[in-house]
Image: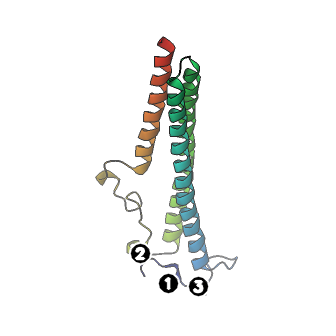
């Protein structure tokens, strides 16, 4: 299996601490995988949370009064905060990805056997139209704009 941790030499050590190279690589892969999975879980939560606020504000807006404007405002604020959460979590992912790449280079893993699950890891940023992260930012922007629009409509009624 190309790029398998099992193919790394496990007997020798990479430094004076005696940590086998396969263990170092496995830890880097595990951290990369953790960041990817945890970030996606958080992303799902943020998208559901923000759309739930928008749905609640829309339901409240169908009744007389201006209380929906407050909920729409809360939704816009939540969308903005979610954007910053997403940026921070993506920094964690990038750090794990870059660390994995450094470990692969230091262990001398041939380039055709390295992890290349994303276009950035394959060095193909130019070929893609948009990243998943950019699309999630766009979704958050759309929900935030819908919240702002709802608040404005309620305010002028």
Q: Which quadrant, please, contains the N terminus?
A: bottom left
Identity of the residue furthest to the bottom in this view: 11
Distance between mark 1 and mark 3 Cα atoms:
8 Å
Q: Position of residue 71 (x, y in %)?
A: 57, 27
Q: Position of residue 150 (x, y in %)?
A: 47, 24
Identity of the residue furthest to the right in this view: 17
In the image, which disc is placed on residue 113? 2
Number of marks present in the image shown? 3
Distance between mark 2 and mark 3 Cα atoms:
17 Å
Q: Secondary structure at mark 3?
A: loop
Residue for point 55% across, 85% down: 9
Residue ID for mark 3: 10
Q: Secondary structure at mark 1?
A: helix
**Mark positioned earlier in the residue sequence (1 or 2):** 1
Pick whichever, 133 or 96, lies toward us.
Answer: 133
Q: Position of residue 27 (x, y in %)?
A: 60, 70
Pick whichever, 1 or 63, lies toward us.
Answer: 63
Residue ID for mark 1: 7
Residue for point 46% across, 18% down: 153
Q: Residues within 10 Å of mark 1 (few under 14, many from 20)?
A: few
Q: How is the image coloured?
A: rainbow
Residue for point 55% across, 21% down: 69
Circles 1 and 2: CB distance less than 8 Å? yes
29 is higher (above) or lower (below) than 95? below
Give the image quarter of residue 115.
bottom left
**Mark positioned earlier in the residue sequence (2 or 3):** 3
In the image, which disc is placed on residue 141? none
Q: Residues within 10 Å of mark 3 (few under 14, many from 20)?
A: some
């Amino acid at each position: 299996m190309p790029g398998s941790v099992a193919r790394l030499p496990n007997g020798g050590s990479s430094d004076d601490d005696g940590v086998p190279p396969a263990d170092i690589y496995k830890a880097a892969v595990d951290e990369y995988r953790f960041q990817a999975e945890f970030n996606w879980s958080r992303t799902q939560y943020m998208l559901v949370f923000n759309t739930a606020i928008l749905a609640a504000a829309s339901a409240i807006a169908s009744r007389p009064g201006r209380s929906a404007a407050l909920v729409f405002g809360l939704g816009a604020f939540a969308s903005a905060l979610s954007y910053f959460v997403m940026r921070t979590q993506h920094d964690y992912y990038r750090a794990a990805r870059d660390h994995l790449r450094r470990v692969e280079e230091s262990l001398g893993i041939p380039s055709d056997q390295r992890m290349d699950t994303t276009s950035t890891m394959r060095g193909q940023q130019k070929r893609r139209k948009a990243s998943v992260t950019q699309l999630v930012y766009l979704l958050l922007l759309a929900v935030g704009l819908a919240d702002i629009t709802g608040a404005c409509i309620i305010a002028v009624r």
